[in-house]
Image (cartoon, helix red, strand yellow):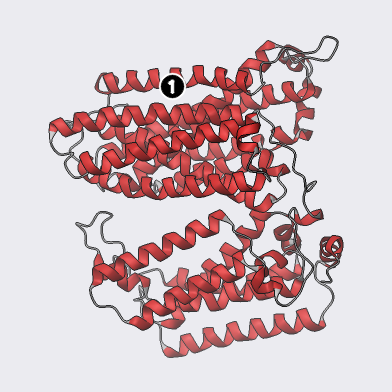
Amino acid sequence: MHESGPVPSRIGWTAVGRGGRILAGAASIAAGLVLLAVAAGGGAEQQIAGLPDAGPLTRWGLPLVRFLYDLCAVGTVGTLLAAAVLAPAGSPERPACARAAGRWASGWAVTVVLSYLLTVSDVLARPVADLLAAPDLLAAGLSVVQARVLPLVLAVVVAAAVATRVPRLPAAIPLVLAVLAIVPVAYVGHAASAADHDIALSGLMTHLVTVSLWTGGLGAVLVHFRRSADLPLVLRRFSTIALCCFAGVAVSGVAAAWARLDDPAHLWRSPYGWFLLAKTAALGVLALFGRAHRRRTVAHVADRGVRNVFTRLAVGELVVMGVAMALAVGLSRTPPPPARGGGHDGLLEYDLAPFTPAGLLTEIRPDPLVLLLLALLAAGYLTGVRRAGSWPAGRTLAWFAGLALAGLVLLGGVGGYARAMLSAQALQLTVLAIAVPLLLCLGAPLTLAARVTTASSQYGALAARPPRRPTALLAVLPIAYMIAFPLLYRTGWLQWALSRHGPHLLTAALFLAGGLVVFWMLAGADPLPSRISRRVRAALCGSLATVLLVMGVFLLAGPPVAGDWFSVAARPAGRRP
């Protein structure tokens, strides 16, 4: 990487120097551990004579390529996090991180292609040379579940790599693309066969994203900022993110183990459990590293001697993270113990009791992703209230009532029955699109953020007044929000959203986001970029009420909506849509 100007923290190859060599050595150690993990998990067992064999290149190359895939994904996400969030505005390291992210993304794209080739070779039990000589066999790999998502991942990764090269494009856009590219592989892992598929899938998605942000962010801080004058601010920012990621890794790991192991004895009686215990031990070691960072480096890193301590601690932490990644590769090659329950309940991909009114409150679906997001919003608001000194109790009550209501319809019986019953789905969507946004907006989070943050705060002024000319955007978003209701129920969108846990969460998030924009304008608790008259607010409120009334009448008296889906999804447990 190259920078212009007399900057003390130049990140050329010679500047990376010792840190780059240490990181390369740590990656080499972790790659060696991949081989040990695969051997321990049975990935290198001798093949039975007479059976088809993909060959040693696939048997040993696939786990190594998967490790490099993970490494490049982590490097891409981490450097983009540094460019978009960690580096202060105007920092010379910000463009350097963006350029480095483009190179990481290019390497990630190469490993995606190699992963596809080796995965198809492994599943079809054909050597790589045979596949390359037979393009038809290689194209048939799209029917292989483990390889089906890789073309999608490749497309998103290439888009992220191109986005890093677009001048003046906010770094948050390629960061979002890189995070999205991590998610699809969760659909073809062990989570796909878990009895509680939705919880296992959500836990794995949370685990992949938080690990990538945590590990990649630390690597980016070490390589790009260890000699920078901005290191004290960057390290404070990353410390907060790392703490949140640690909580995400721990919670998602517990959820994954709960979904895949129906007997605690499997932890010490199966190879899968041994890998989980080893990863838990690695997480405990990382917790000790984090504690050492907070006590010894974060507050005093401006001192040169403390910087050296930070470098040593960070390198040691990255080595442990590399070990954990190697264990994750071994875990992916190790089948979990068979579940006694025999799988999930039909199309829902999880077991759900027959419907009763009390079940709307007693049924619990502890989705780790939703839990962590709600906890993060609650903790952030409480921190702001504490720093504000005096804050209206009604605002606080409205905010936490909104979070509680969101948790009720997402994590309780309503969330479970929403994919099997049209009435529960409509109730969940109405609450998430109307009641929850209204309560959250009445909590005035932007006003609170403006009161407790300034330009010199850790993340700057979080609620700086928006520009004066987003009037067109404020007009378009409410219209799109209201059009989304008929689109959901009059197209195939609803059935697609109900078919998988990921699309279901995405649909809920879109309607929640649209509701937040609309009720931000209607509630008037937070400042708007431009003044909206009472007449415009009344027109918006009337239009929204009309759309909801028409859709309610349509659902009650109109033709069946997604009737094929609800009749089949409800049938295994004797429920009626």
Name the residue at 24% across, 33% down.
310
Q: Is residue 97 among what the camera can see?
A: yes
- Circle 1: element type: helix
Q: Is residue 383 above or below residue 173?
A: below
Question: Residue 329 is drawn in which quadrant?
Answer: top right
The residue singled out by tag 1 in the image is: 27
Task: Please provide percent x and percent y for residue 141.
Answer: 76, 29
Name the residue at 23% across, 28% down.
10
Name the residue at 62% across, 39% down.
185
Q: Nearer the viewer, residue 355 or 542?
A: 355
93 lies left or right of 445: left
Q: Nearer the viewer, residue 114 or 264?
A: 264
Task: Please provide percent x and percent y for residue 457.
Answer: 22, 57
Question: Residue 1 is drawn in which quadrant?
Answer: top left
Q: Residues within 10 Å of mark 1 (few under 14, many from 20)?
A: many
Say which quadrant the C terminus sits in: bottom right
Task: Please provide percent x and percent y for residue 245.
Answer: 43, 46
Task: Please provide percent x and percent y for residue 440.
Answer: 45, 74
Q: Is residue 297 among what the camera can see?
A: no
Q: Is residue 411 above or below residue 66?
A: below
Q: Is residue 370 above or below residue 90?
A: below
454 lies left or right of 273: left
Name the residue at 12% across, 36% down.
303
Residue, far top: 49
**Three-letter amino acid code of the residue under disc 1:** Ala
Q: Total label count?
A: 1
